[in-house]
Amino acid sequence: MLQRNRTLTGCGTCRSRHVKCDESRPVCQKCQHQGLTCLGYERQLMWAKDGLQDSPQDPDRVFRRPLFSVEDQERMTRMTVDSLGRQSATAALTKLDGEHGRAESRWEHDSFRGPFGVLKLPPSVASPSGHDASQPDPAESSQADWDFLWPPLDSAPTIAEDDHLFDGLYNIAEDVEDVPRADLSLDIDPIPNNLEVLLPDALGIISDGFLSQQTSLPMSLIPNPSLALSRSKYIPSQAPELLRYFKENIISLSFPLKNCQKCPWQAIHLPTAMSTYAELSIHQTASHTRLSLFYSLLAASCLHMFSRNPNAVDLNMSSKGFTQIAKQHLEVALNEEVLGSRRAKYKELLMAVLSMVMLSIFHGENSNAQAFLVDAEYLIRIRGLPKPHKSLKVRSLHHVYTYIRIMAESTCGCALLDICPDRPSSSLLAIESSPLSLRSFRVARDSLDEEIDLTLEKSDEVGHNDIHLEVMGQWKDTLYPDIYGVPESLMTLLSQTIRIANERELLHRNTTVDMNILQDLEKRASLLEQYVLSWVPPSRPQPSLIRHTAIENSEDSDHNTSQLLMRAMHQALILFYYRRIPNISALILQDTVRKCLDFLQRSDNARAESVPNDTAILWPGFVAACEALDPDLQRGLLDWLVSTGHRTSLSSFSAAAKTAQMVWEARDKAKDYTLSWFDVMKHERCPIIAT
């Protein structure tokens, strides 16, 4: 192949046209043949502010301009100063100098202190003495090695205190430079010194070699989130056993999806975690999103093992430690999504966020779960909804988000908070102005006086974009029956009930009431009541004639179980409606409570005869338990919560049982049978998320 010679000495015209110049003097012949004006060979570069007053303006002269604007330079200066924190530059350099001495034999990557860093290069020659440099005392250097891994485990910031990970995300397409980079820098505190308590050697989760060789993760010292966080080269020694345990015993972080083929934790999370383990074993590196999925799976396995053996406190601490690592990697991945040029795979990133939601619920950190749900909503609206084609995996992730979000809003909704977000806009694709308001669970603007009709059919566009089930109607491509065994119509009625209940709550808080809004709200609530009371389970589609008899019998059993679960959910929805909207006495609701308990018990019996350890949904049992007044009903629902909690190994069931007992005690003490868990647990931002 003929090579072309390149030169930087051509005339200005040829260089601007990107053609080869013959460099003839005083003007090139190529320009003469083309009839062009040759700009010659003089220097055409000058600084933008050099000699502009003395020399005339030359349109052909090329000016060299600064790469960054004055605002960008000031922002980077502030970012550099802020990265130091409270320490001085001298102190940062001193610490860096001292750490570098220990790092010669232990650290594998660069180390940073604010804007200062030390480049770690492998030694080119052996030590003259013929032996390795002196090794530091492990007791002295263990804190330096793990100084950046975990924040204090007792820190659980609420939504209001969190610096939202997606601040400014909706402006990123217009002007990336307008995003305040310094505000998004990571700030991760060191963990306590007693690392053996967090990850005990007796458990074998992390070996001594792992503790001594773990790569440092100086995230709090990175001045710009776009800088790559150091990846962990070493993995827990028991990772294969924990991966195998998850596959054989857990399968899904959402228990209702345990036997569902469309479960994202089976289709995305587990394969990605196993692939990440292979990447770490061979290449010793992986993306932050995949590392978050990997460590969240290890955390789930440890937590599940702890639920089966409560005396093994070390398992619980190990689960919290892995959860913190997964959370930190997810924070970096989300920051890279906002500021960096690299974009993670959408399915993996959303899967990582939803996994952190479930882990937060399992650890009782419901406010953190709400914050991650906010991040998930932004991610879906920014990257998921604009997709022209949504695959089955993407749709299943969106359905899982919607289910968890609606369940969270039903027990931790804005009516529980002092300040409720504004009404959402009419467009389902709109991104609200504030990152903390999002699309609130209220009736959309200009929709209070509209008729609601559950029989209408949604278009595909509305069905895909209605991630909060704001629009009444039915969608033929919904996945709720396949994933949760619950029809979308029930979930839509629950979403509409939450919205009207929140509107009534806010009306009661206001000193002045708009009578027109009140009348429209009462009319809408009355129509919704008719739909809630008259709802019936959808008819089962006719089976194919070529199906095998055994398959038909299995499907008949599953259908019977799902029908009983639907009816239990329906009775719980009736209880929820009358508690949150008219707020009637629980004495009137006891027959509905009895029906709900009966359907739950019959569903368990049918499940035990077909598939043991099958799905279970907490929400109907929790709502019915809170409304129970009769001692037999209270005892029956309490037994159901406790036994199902033992069967599923989920702490949420025991938390629901404790909350219901607190409601019973408060009602007996006040003799007020209209009290709900909202009234009893008002001191907590989010008492429970009943998924």
Image (tube, rainbow, N blue to C red):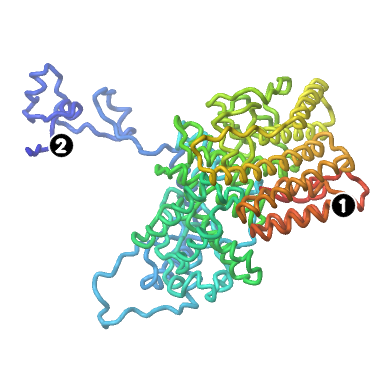
Residue 57: horizontal and vertical position, in percent? 29, 23
**Residue 94, above or below 85:** below
Residue 593's image quarter?
A: top right
Residue 514: horizontal and vertical position, in percent? 81, 23
Q: Distance between the residues labelled 1 and 2?
A: 85 Å
Give the secondary structure at mark 2.
Answer: loop
Q: Which amino acid does label 2 sit on?
A: Leu
Quarter that holds the N terminus: top left
Residue 467: horizontal and vertical position, in percent? 59, 34
Give the secondary structure at mark 1.
Answer: helix
**Residue 72, above or below 531:** below
Q: Do the residues labelled 1 and 2 touch (CB within 8 Å)?
A: no
In this image, 137 relative to 493: left or right?
Answer: left
Residue at which label 2 appears:
8
Q: Which amino acid does label 1 sit on?
A: Ala
Looking at the picture, tell me which residue is in the foreground, 633 or 165: 633
View extreme (top): residue: 35
Residue 689 shows in this picture: no
In this image, 413 relative to 427: left or right?
Answer: right
The local crowd at label 1, few if under 14, some if 14 to 19, many if 20 or more residues have their Cα within 10 Å, is: some
Decide which of tag 1 and tag 2 comes sooner along the chain.
2
Residue displayed at 32% across by 79% down:
132
Residue displayed at 80% across by 31% down:
507
Residue displayed at 70% across by 28% down:
443
Residue 195 shows in this picture: yes
**Residue 109, above or below 186:** below
Residue 323: horizontal and vertical position, in percent? 55, 58
Q: Which mark is residue 666?
A: 1
Looking at the picture, tell me which residue is in the foreground, 390 or 634: 634
